[in-house]
Image (spheres, rainbow, N blue to C red):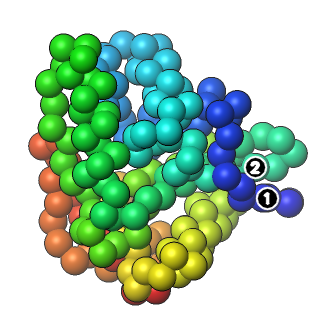
Amino acid sequence: MTIIIRNAEIKDAAAIAPLIYDAIGDIANNLTGQDVPQKILASLEQLVTETTNRHSYLNTYVAERNDEILGIVVLYDGHLGKKLDSQLEAQLAEKGIPITLDVEAHMDEYYIDTICVSKDARGLGIGTRLLQFAEQKGKQLGYSKISLNVELEKIDARRLYERMGYSTTESWTIINEPFHHMVKSL
C-alpha cells in the first residue's frame, strides 16, 4: 500500500471538509455559524479554499492512495493561531455571528489542529504516518515541541498519542468543552 502525504490543494476541499467535520464534531457549528450538516460541510469546504484561516488548504496535508484522500492533518505555528482565528472571527461577525475562538496552542508550539483518517482507512497506520509527518515538519521549522488537543472521551486517540510519545500537560477548554492538551518534545 503506497500512501503519499502531500500539501492539500484547493481542488481537495470537497474531500477534506468531511474529514474536518468528523474530527471536530460540534465545534464545526461554531467555526461555520451553521447548524445543518450540509451547510456545515459547505462552509468547511469554503474555509479550506481560503488562505486566511486555520483550515486553509495552505495549512492542510493529505494522505492519499491512488488519488483517494484517506486522511488529513492541519498544522500551524502556535504563534499564528490568534491571527488565523481573528480573521475567521471577522468573517463570522460580518454574517452577524459574534464569536471569540479559543486559543488552542501555546505560542512556542507547532500545533496539530486537526487530524482524521477516513472511517474506511482506519487501522492501516495512516494516523501514525500523519503524526510522524507533523513532527518532521515541526522539526524542520525549528520547533522543540509539538502539541494537540484531544477530547476527553476520545480514549483510543489519546492512547495512540501516548504511544507516539505525547503526554498530557494540562487541561484545556475549547468552546466550553474539556480537552487534554498533549505535548511531545521534538
Against 83, residue 33 (above or below) is above
Which mark is drawn over residue 30?
Answer: none
Q: Position of residue 177 (x, y in %)?
A: 17, 46
Against 140, residue 15 (above or below) is above
Circle 2/circle 1 CB separation < 8 Å: yes
Q: Position of residue 19 (x, y in %)?
A: 54, 38
In the image, 125: left or right of 28?
Answer: right
Out of 66 and 136, give the one closest to the viewer.
Answer: 136
Q: Position of residue 79 (x, y in %)?
A: 31, 64
* Residue under the image location 65 percent in, 45 percent down: 8
Q: Which residue is mark 2?
A: 64
* Residue under the image location 52 percent in, 51 percent down: 59
Against 102, residue 38 (above or below) is above
Against 27, residue 62 (above or below) is below
Out of 87 and 121, give the one closest to the viewer.
Answer: 87
In the image, 90: left or right of 25?
Answer: left
- Residue type at mark 1 is Ile
- Quarter of the image holding residue 180? bottom left
Q: Which residue is mark 1?
A: 3
Mark 2: give few (<14), some (14-19) or many (20+) Cα within 10 Å.
Answer: some
- Residue type at mark 2 is Glu
Mark 1: give few (<14), some (14-19) or many (20+) Cα within 10 Å.
Answer: some
Q: Callout 1: helix, strand or loop?
A: loop
Q: Position of residue 133 (x, y in %)?
A: 61, 69
Q: Callout 2: helix, strand or loop?
A: strand
In the image, 66: left or right of 62?
Answer: right
* Residue under the image location 48 percent in, 82 percent down: 142
- Quarter of the image holding residue 132? bottom right
Q: Which quadrant: the N terminus?
A: bottom right
